[in-house]
Amino acid sequence: MLVLARKLHESIRIGDEIEVSVVEIKGDQVKLGIKAPPRITVHRQEVYEAIQRENVSAAEAEPSRVPSLEGVLNQPQPDEPNQPQRKAAPGKPGKQEKPGKRSNSGGSSERP
């Protein structure tokens, strides 16, 4: 393992495409900035390990525990959200909801 000392606003390069900079030092915490191409994934170690565990678990799953996708693509979908809204006929008043608004009937309109 290569160990390097860096001060605030100093950086290191990994190859030609990755730069790691010390952005902030506060107490015992160091914040790093990482510049890398989008094709290179960057994760905290604990997140990387969780992803690896999930991948192994998925690869080891018994086929009987994986639901079949047969017929899913051809099933009719209930009320597609991209359907155009009907407008009231000319001369007749009609109630239209504004996009993003919900009526208060049937529960709270707030989302967590």
Image (cartoon, helix red, strand yellow):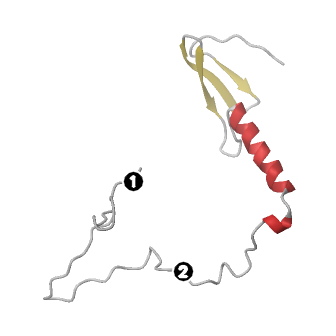
Q: Is residue 112 above or below residue 63?
A: above
Q: Which one is in front, 73 or 65?
A: 65
Residue on which the image places disc 1: 111
Q: Amino acid at mark 1?
A: Arg
Task: Please provide percent x and percent y for residue 93.
Answer: 15, 83
- Give the Cα distance between marks 2 and 1: 24 Å
In the picture as drawn, the residue positioned furthest to the front comes out as 106
Direction from residue 50 to residue 64 in the image, left or right: right
Residue on which the image places disc 2: 77
Direction from residue 108 to residue 90 in the image, left or right: left
**Label 2 Cα neighbours within 10 Å, binned few <14 / some 14-19 / many ≥20:** few
Q: Which one is in front, 108 or 59?
A: 108
Q: Is residue 72 above or below residue 38?
A: below
Q: Is residue 41 above or below residue 107?
A: above
Q: Disc 2 vs disc 1: which is toward the camera?
A: 1
Q: Amino acid at mark 2?
A: Gln
Q: Secondary structure at mark 2?
A: loop
**Label 1 Cα neighbours within 10 Å, binned few <14 / some 14-19 / many ≥20:** few
Q: Which one is in front, 30 or 12?
A: 30
